[in-house]
Image (spheres, grey):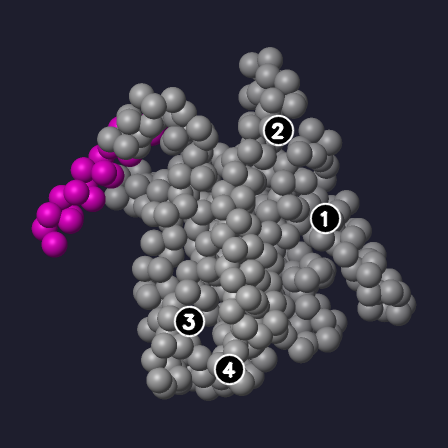
Amino acid sequence: MRELRSRWSALAARIEAATPAGRDRAVDALRALAILGVVLGHWLVTSLTAAGGGLRGTSPLSHMPWLAPVSWVFQTLAVFFLVGGHVAALGYTSARERGTSYGAWVGQRLGRLFRPVAAVLVLWTVVAGGMLVGGTELDTVRTLVKLVLSPLWFLLVFAALTAATPLVARLSPVWPAVVVAGVDGWRFGLGGPDWIGWANVAAGWLVPFTLGAAWSRGALARRGRLLLLLVGGAATATATLVLWGGYPASMVGVPGAPVSNLNPPTLAAVAFGLVQCGLALLARDRLARLMHRPSAWAKAALVNLSAMTVFLWHQTAMMAVTALGLLVPVRLPGLHTPPDSLGWTAARVVWLPVFAASLGLCWAAFRTHERARRSRPAAVTAARCVPRTSVEEKLHA
């Protein structure tokens, strides 16, 4: 144990030494918290139950709707889009000042997002094909593949908004919020078609993205504005929309529910996202102070260096543990049993470290796909120490 602590201290010291002095560490801390929130949220509200020789997807929120507050804590995508808009706006401005073309800038940014995707798609194409050939039920294969691919919608939307940064960086968040409100009014109030709700996929996530761009311009420096954002968003999301407007209390989709706040985003999800953004911006000074502790900063930096690997493989890690658990002759609580009691919830919490260990194996196997190709000397340097280029560039991915 003492040796592990010594190695960790040495790694943290190397990361600290490689970090530029002017880096805004609070931004990286917020991004790490957003990614980890999504991962933990999925692990807590996604359940694969053993039934009829196969696996079926369900959620504890279907059986215990009073657990909806869990989604308020772990549905942190708005913070990720907030940070994404902030970093994209700053990055594009910096690229223009250096004379870098839009094509070169957007190609570099999107490359960082999509390089790790190929490994996921190739592996699961092989796995799904092998399962079908081996006689696995089609519904089981469909359930597993859906869990793997469903997070990719977020990546596609994030990539589209990043590519549109020159057009939307100075757009007020009010305008996309008005679009979301109009779409919801048409869809829910006037009986419009359900497909019109998909317009909110772009408009809904454009709200925190443009809020992040405004943050990069210094428009959110005043604490009073952030408190207004927090209080106004909380009052709108909880009191008006959820309590009186008929919107679901859960901020994630619930299997079998007639309306999802997330798929596509509703005005309730957007308003609640503003609450999270307000909290994040109010906490950034405290986070910045915390991140000047080498150990805390090393943890945030390492999550950021492998953010897409963690995001893309966390469902695979959970499913691998679930599948291996089927080798045990009894159904394991919190893993294969129906998520319909507090006992299941307690058992699922016990499984979280096992999922994390499985994700660690995925990270070790596939993290190289997230790195840009470098020459051999650079690769040797990276193996010995966290390089400055990684800290400066990859944390912006």
- State the residue at coordinates (35%, 84%): 329
The mark nearer the N terminus, 2 or 1, is 2
Q: Nearer the viewer, mark 3 or mark 1?
A: 3
Q: Which residue is mark 4?
A: 53
Q: Position of residue 70 (x, y in %)?
A: 50, 70
| CB contact under 8 Å: marks 1 and 4 | no
| CB contact under 8 Å: marks 2 and 3 | no
Instruction: Report how far apart the C-alphas of labels 2 and 1 lie in the structure.
Output: 18 Å
* 177 displayed left or right of 10: right
Magenta region: 1-21
Q: Position of residue 325 (x, y in %)?
A: 37, 74
Instruction: Report how far apart the C-alphas of labels 1 and 4 lie in the structure.
Output: 39 Å
- State the residue at coordinates (40%, 39%): 368
Question: What residue type is disc 3 on?
Answer: Thr
Q: Which residue is mark 3?
A: 322
Q: Nearer the viewer, mark 2 or mark 3?
A: 3
The mark nearer the N terminus, 2 or 4, is 4
Q: Position of residue 60 (x, y in %)?
A: 52, 78
Question: What residue type is disc 1 on?
Answer: Ala
